[in-house]
Amino acid sequence: MTGKEGVAGKEGVASEAGKVGLAGRARAVRGFVGRIWLAVLLLALWEAAARAAGDLYFPPPTEIASTARELWWSGPASRLFLSDKALDDFGPSLTHLLAGWAIAAAVGIAAGVAIGLSRVLFELLDPVLQLGRAIPPPTLIPFFLVVFGLGTEMQVATIVFGAVWPVLLNTVEGVRGVEPLYLDTARAFGFGRATRILRVVLPAAAPRTAAGLRVALGFALILMVIAELMGAGGGIGAHLNDAERGFLPTELWAGIALLGLIGYLLNGVFLLVERRLIGHHRERQD
């Protein structure tokens, strides 16, 4: 091969790579537009309808966004523009949410593995689990108030009770669905019980467990708000209470929009982590 042919070949490869890169970016843009166009359309219709109605209780999205910026994102750039109120509201709420979700995840996975691996435990406890999952967590808030008092413990307990069930039940089903051949092979290689759980059972059950964790994250956000509405001294729920008592509907809508944004971001982060950790496992199953 001459020098000119080598240069031409490299230019051809670079040209093809450039085309592939452009095609990938075009697909990404089309996918983004395809996901966001409906939201933009709904916001535009909401804006037009709210301005036409002129109703105090039905503010347009632009006013809600402006109020949210003034409340939570009017701080210095060194704090990512977070205001003092943002720190007061976000800190307690996210701490309760993530702490409750983490405890529910740990308890649900540990108990789910134990129950899923034992036929006796499953047959004994399944009716109890089905009964427990059917109890609406908000109905236990008065009980938690008596036991823990009004504070962080009550709020975290409410979140844990509601969020544990999807993790627990999905983990049980995931563990029970592990191929017996995998476990027999692990035993043949001399793996101990703990090693079989860590290297065979948990990875095989990971897709079901991840699905339960994702549902539990949504439950945790809902229960966080419900618990804080019961009279918390801080947090987003307390902001909603203050806005309602102060007859500030735009601030109330700003809090509702903030909760939706937090839920969207948490779900997006969870999906990103899930794809990184067990995406290859899902692809092999498909």
Image (cartoon, helix red, strand yellow):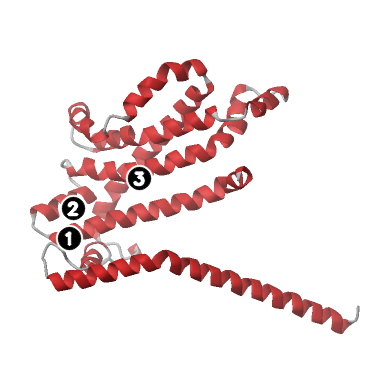
Label 3 sits on residue: 218
Which residue was labeled with disc 2?
Answer: 239
Of residues 189 and 72, the one drawn nearer to the viewer in this rendering: 189
Say which label, 3 or 1, has the lower sequence index: 3
- Earlier in the chain: of badge 3 and badge 2, it is 3
Residue 181 locus on image (x, y percent)? 67, 27
Neighbour class for label 3 at 10 Å: few (<14), some, many (≥20)? some
Badge 1 crowding class, 10 Å Cα cut-off, few under 14, some 14 to 19, many 20 or more, is many
| Residue 226 percent coordinates (x, y) | 22, 42
Q: Is residue 102 above or below residue 48?
A: above
**Image-based side of 218 in relation to 183, left or right:** left
Residue 138 position by quadrant: top left
Residue drawn at x 12%, y 53% as measured from the top left: 244
Q: CA distance from mark 3 to mark 2?
A: 20 Å
Question: Where is mark 1, residue-wise?
Answer: 251
| Structural distance between the alpha carbons of marks 3 and 1 | 23 Å
